[in-house]
Amino acid sequence: MFFNSLAFAVFLPIVFFLYWFVFNKTKSAQNALLIIASYYFYSCWDWRFLFLLVFSTFLDYYTGIQIEKGKSETNRKFWFWLSIIVNLGFLGIFKYYNFFVASFSDLLNSVGIKASPILLDLILPVGISFYTFHGLSYVIDIYYKRIKAEYNFVDYSLFVSYFPLLVAGPIERATHLLPQVKVKRDFDFEKAKEGVYQIIWGLVKKVVIADTCATYANAIFDNYTSMNSLSLILGAIYFAFQIYGDFSGYSDIALGVSKLFGLDLLRNFNYPYFSRDIAEFWRRWHISLSSWFRDYLYIPLGGSKGGLWMKIRNTFIIFVVSGFWHGANWTYIAWGFINAMYFLPLLLSNSNRNNLDEIKLKLNLDCVKVIISIFSTFFITCIAWVFFRAKTIADAFSYLKRVMINGNFDFQYLDNERYNYEFLLMIGLFVLVEWNNRTKVEPLSGKRSLLRTGLAIVAIIAFGTYSDYKEFIYFQF
Amino acid sequence: MKRFLIYITGILILTVLIAVVLDVIYTSIFLQSKNRGKIETVFNSEAQKFDVIILGSSRANNHFVSEMFEDKGLRTFNYGMSGGHLFEASLLLKLMIERNYEIKNVILEADLNLSNDQESDGVSAKFLPYIHNSNVIRNHFSEQKNFNELYYIPFYRYLKYDSKIGFREIVKIEVREKTNALDNLGFYPLKKHKNGNMKNNIVNLNPLTHNRYYEEIKNICKSNNINLIVVMTPMCENVVGMNYFDKVKKAYPEIHNYENAVVEDKYFSSCGHMTDEGAKLFTARILRDFFQK
C-alpha cells in the first residue's frame, strides 16, 4: 500500500475517522488503533514479515527494560549487545549476506581460488533498515542513560511501527516521538491543515516531478552507451530531481499524514539543492539519517575530537556506512566515499560549518558568489548521483567518461518517446516555487493558499505521471 | 473538527471541479484533433468513399502499400495501427460506419492478433477522449473491466493513459504538430535493420476459436455490403511455431494464408515486419489475387 495508491486513499480516511470519532477517548485507545492500522498497513506488503517487525519491537522493548534494570555493568552490557547483535544480525542476513558472500567469492576467484558461494533466496523486508534504526537508537539511548526505558508495550510499539514512518522513515528518536505518544492527542485544526498542505505538496513532488523525471532518467541511464553528452548531463539532473522528489515527497506525505493524527515527525529535508556547500547539503538531505549517524556513529567514534586524522577517519566511516546503509552494492559505497571526498576540503579548512545561516540573495557581488556555490554544489552532487543510480561502478565511470568524450550537445529523442530537454521547463518551475518558499516547510500555506492548493491539485491531475507507475525508491532500502 | 471536515470537503470539491474542468478542456481539444493519428482523424471526419480500407496491427500498417492500390485506381487508406488488436480494428470500422463512410472492400490482417480479444491499452486509449461523444465508443468499451471508472470519473481516462492522451498530447494538438501516421496514405514503410530481431517464437500462441472482434468485423461488413478480405501476412524464415498459421486456417478457413508470400530475410526489417521492398512485393501479390480485373 503506497502513499500514492488508491488503497491508501481509502485506508487513510477510515483510520482518521476511527481515530477521532471512535477511539478518541483515551491515549491508550488512540495508540491501540494506530498500532492495528500500522500492522495492517505493513502486512499489505507481506504479512510474513510482520512477525519480524513484532519480534524486533519486542526485543528492543525487553532489552531496553533489562538494560535499565541491570544491576551490574556486565548485565547492562549483555542486554545492550544482545539487542545490537540481533538487530544488526537480521539486517545483515536480509540485506547484506548475499553481498558479502558474493564479494568474498569474487575476491577468491580473482586470486585463482575457485569458490562457489551459497547465496540465500531472500526478499528484503520492507522498511527493515528504518525500524531497525529506530530500535537501535532507543536501546543505545537507554544504555547511555539519555532516556528512560518505556514500560508500556503499546506505546513503544507505536514508536517503532507507526505507519507513516514505518517503511521509509523519517528515522525517529525516542526523545522526540515517545513523549508525544504518551499523551492523548486532541484535534488541532491548524496542524491538520498543515498536514493536508504537506500531503498535497508531497504528491506534487512524487507524481509530477519524481515519476516524470524517472521516465527520462531511466531512458538515459539504461541506454547511456548510445546517449550524447547533453543527454547524459540531463540524465544526471533528471535523476537528481527524481530521487529528491521521490524521497522528500514521501517524507512530506509521511509528515503530513502524521499531523492528521496529531503527531509531529522529524523533518527530513530542507531544500537540499539550495545548499552552498556539501556540508550544508548533508544538513538538509535525509536529515534524520545524517543526524542518526552523527549521534550514534560519528560521536561515539570520537567525532571531531582527537586530532585531524581521527576526524578524517570518522568522516569517511560515516559517509561510507551511510552509503552502504542504502543497499548492498558497491555503487552505494562509492557514492558515500565520493561524498566524503567532497567533504574533506571543508573539513581540512575547518569550513564545514560556514553556511549555517539562511540563504539570502541581495543584488551585490555576494549574490553571484552564493549562486555559483549553489550551482557548483548541485553539480558535484549530480556526479555522485551517477554512482548511486548506475548498476555498477564501471558503468558510472563509463557514463561520466562518455559525458566528457562524446562532445555532442544536440537534442536527442529518447526511449520514452520524448526529447531529452522536454521536462526541463517543469523542473525550472518547480525549483522556482521551492526557492520562493524556502523558509517554509511547504509552499502551499500562507497568502492565497486556496489558489496555491488549487494549482497544486491541477499539477497533480494534469501533469502527473500515472501510466508508468513508480514505487518509492527508498522503500527498497 | 467541524472546521476541518468543512475544509477537507472543500478540498475534495475543488479537486472534483478541477477534474471536470480539465476533462471538458481536454475533450474539446481532442474534438479538434485532425492530423495526429488515424483514430482522431476518423472520429473528426465527415462521410467519405473508399474502394479499399486496410485494418489490422503493425503487420497491416507496414505491409500494405496504399499507393499501389491508388495506382490501380482504387481509393485506399491503410488504417493499420502499430500495437493494435482486433478490438481497436473493429471499433475503428464501427466509427467509419457511424460516419457514413462508403467502403467497398476491407482488407483485414488477422493472424497473430487472433490469439486474443483484449484491448491494446496503448492504442485503445486514443478512443477514450470521445467516450462521452460517441455511443459506438461507449458501447464498445462498456464490457471492459474498468469501464465505470473511465466513463464516470471525470478526467480519470486522461490520468490513466497520460502518456497517450495526457498533457503532452494536448500541447501537440494545440500547436498543430503533425505525426507521420497519416503519411503515405497510412502505410508506414520500414527499412532493413542491422540489429532487427530475426528470430521469433510463437510456439505458445494459439488462435482463439471464436474471436469476438473478428466476428464483429465480419458482421459489420456483411450488414453493410462490404467485401471483406482477411489475410495472414508474411513472417521471416526463422519463426519457431509456424504451425500457428495452420491452426488459424483450421479455425477460420476463410482467412487467406500469405505467410509464405515473401520469405527471404532480406525483405524483413524484423521477423514480423517486412521492409518497404517486401511490402511492395506482398501488396503486388494481393492486388494480383484480389483486384485483378
Image (cartoon, helix red, strand yellow):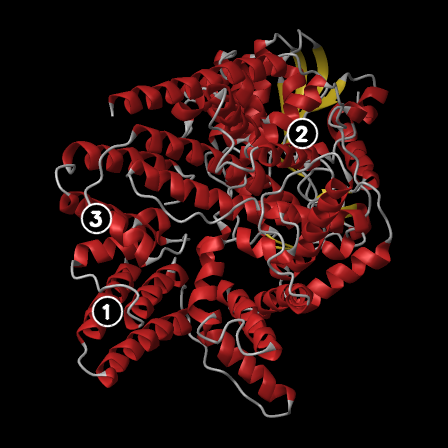
- x and y percent of residue A338 in the render? 65, 66
Residue for badge 2: B80
Query: In the drawing, what numbered circle is on residue B251?
Result: none
Q: Distance between the residues labelled 2 and 3?
A: 54 Å
How many other residues sit within 10 Å of disc 2, few (<14), some (14-19) or many (≥20)?
many
**In the figure, A400 relative to B172: above or below?**
below
Residue for badge 1: A64
Q: Which chain carries label 3?
A: A
* Helix, strand or loop status at disc 1: helix
How many other residues sit within 10 Å of disc 1, few (<14), some (14-19) or many (≥20)?
many
Residue A76 visible in the current orientation: yes
* Helix, strand or loop status at disc 2: loop
Amino acid type shown at disc 1: Gly
| Circle nearer the viewer, 2 or 1 | 1
Q: Judge by depth and name the residue closer to the eye, B30 or B66.
A: B30
Q: Mark 1 lies on which chain?
A: A
| Circle nearer the viewer, 2 or 3 | 3
Amino acid type shown at disc 2: Gly
How many other residues sit within 10 Å of disc 3, few (<14), some (14-19) or many (≥20)?
some
Q: Distance between the residues labelled 1 and 3?
A: 23 Å
**Which residue is outermost to the bottom?**
A113
Query: In the drawing, what numbered circle is on residue A36?
Result: 3
Amino acid type shown at disc 3: Ile
Give left or right: position of B21 versus A54: right
